[in-house]
Amino acid sequence: MKRLDILMKRQDLLKAEITANLNFLIGTVAKSPAMAGYGLTTKEANKTVSRYVRKGLVPVALEMTRRYAKLWKLMQKLSKVNWEILNLENE
């Protein structure tokens, strides 16, 4: 199997894994000492924004923020594979 074929297969696998992880939240879920419950803190338009997360939704929100971290790593891997494909196709 050629190097390009291997990279194309890896690209397809990464795309599928990225698609499977698109249900995500950007930010951090944490309990603040000043607040009674949990909050999701994120940046929007260069400002830190906190949103209240109901107690029953905390496990789901935590999983969604972990999914974002995983998605970020997958996108970095895909970028590297895409770069290698680009270089091989233009030789």
Image: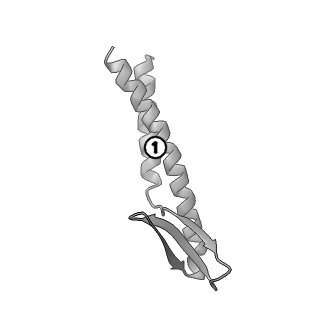
In the image, farthest residue toward the top: 91
Query: Which x, y percent locates residue 31?
Result: 65, 75
Q: Residue at x 64, y 77 (%)?
A: 32
Q: Residue at x 43, y 36 (%)?
A: 79
Q: Name the foreground residue: 22 vs 45.
A: 45
The residue that mark 1 highlights is 75
In the image, farthest residue toward the front: 46
Q: Name the foreground residue: 68 vs 52.
A: 52
Q: Secondary structure at mark 1?
A: helix
Q: Residue at x 57, y 63 (%)?
A: 63
Q: Report the side of 12 relative to 58 (left or right).
A: left
Q: Residue at x 48, y 40 (%)?
A: 76
Q: Is residue 17 above or below residue 46?
A: above
Q: Name the foreground residue: 67 vs 27.
A: 27
Query: Which x, y percent locates residue 1?
Result: 45, 17
- Quadrant where the C terminus lies? top left
Q: Is residue 9 above or below residue 54?
A: above
The quadrant where residue 78 appears: top left
Question: What colouring method underlies this structural image?
Answer: one colour
Query: Which x, y percent locates residue 6?
Result: 45, 24
Query: Which x, y percent locates residue 82?
Result: 39, 31
In the image, farthest residue toward the bottom: 36
Q: Amino acid at mark 1?
A: Met
The quadrant where residue 36 appears: bottom right
Q: Is residue 14 above or below residue 24?
A: above
Mark 1 neighbour class, 10 Å CA radius: few under 14, some 14 to 19, many 20 or more: some
